[in-house]
Image (cartoon, grey):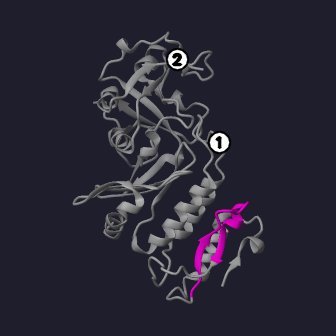
Amino acid sequence: MTNAAEGDEIRTEAILPEDLVLRRIPPQWVVRDGDHFKASSQAFNNDGDGEPMSIYLDELLRLNRLERQRVIDGHDGFFVAALKVEDLQREDQEVIHDPIEPPIHCCDPAHGIAVGGKAPKVRKRLARSARWLPGLGPGPGEYLDEA
Amino acid sequence: MTQTMGSEIGGSDVSGVVGRDLTFACPGFSCSASPWVSISPGATSLGEYFALAPVPAQPYFALPSSPEWMVDIADRYSHLSSLPPGWDGLRAKAVSRQSLYRSLDFLLQVAMLVQIPPSLVPTVSGGVALEWHKDGIDVEVEFPSTGPAFASVDAHESEFEGELDAGMSVLVRTLMHL
């Protein structure tokens, strides 16, 4: 269960527009774009039960001394895409720290949600903004440039 | 001719069924005498989805052969049909039979118009999306478990977003130029 519904543990003030959020991408959501691979717009929808889209807050992973690749621990074959918080905010998505309690996965303390409607246009724009994390993408594609 | 394949192939997987149907259909797929690959939405197993049905009264496109990439697509359908609930690591639903049926039916209608295969993508709510992306052109068609199919076209000279039926002409025109 998440804490957001209970109204505690919410620290939106600590989340900055330039921060990154990470999204697990199962292989079923990888699509071809010419010779490249990108995440489908379907990867940026709310969950199957209508709950907000799950994300991991990159800054909180760092504060918890967790490497980014730990996000897909236990999820063989999955990839990781990154979005800037401002990409989500531009689409009227509220990014909230929503740690999963009690933690099941090592990254659960850095878990968050992107709250807001995910109309097809919104999902498509999010997919265009997303970048694979270096070393955690499916092959040729657009990767996060951290230079 | 109406013949149910389900009784012949029993529990065979989808890829085998589609591959065989297409192999069978390709050589003679020229006119009204040819069988049309179709699916039975009321089937109780994946094998039973596929039936050789009479040519539709108004076939969308009568073309000489099926594209080779349909065999790979058949494998992909087989994969999608086997995804368990939670395949996304969270709470995604299993892909519904109705979505498989509707998306494949659509794909069979437009397959010969398109040079490149679509990416087949499951949705969290049990639907299926077909996506084509190339050279800045994006075409997506989503078949939810219930309700109308939704199409989205972003091409250099045309855009559309709405129910599939309303955007069919834009969609077909765009697919033909991919």
Q: Residue at x 44, y 17 (%)?
A: A60
Q: Are marks 1 and 2 in contact (CB under 8 Å)?
A: no
Q: Quadrant of residue A48?
A: top right
| Residue A70 location (% of width, % of height) | 53, 27
Q: Nearer the viewer, residue A51 or A54?
A: A51
Task: Give the structural element (helix, strand or loop) at label 2.
Answer: helix
**Part of the protein shown in magenta:** B34-52
Q: Is B57 rendered above or below residue A137?
A: below
Question: Residue B85 bears which disc, if any?
Answer: 1
Q: Is residue B40 magenta?
A: yes
Q: Residue at x 37, y 47 (%)?
A: A141
- On screen, residue B85 versus residue A93, left or right, reads right
| Quadrant assignment for the C terminus of chain B | bottom left
Q: Quadrant of residue B105?
A: bottom right
- On screen, residue A114 versus residue A72, left or right, reads left
Furthest residue toward top: A8
Q: Read off the residue under disc 2.
A: A5
Residue type, mark 1 in image: Pro
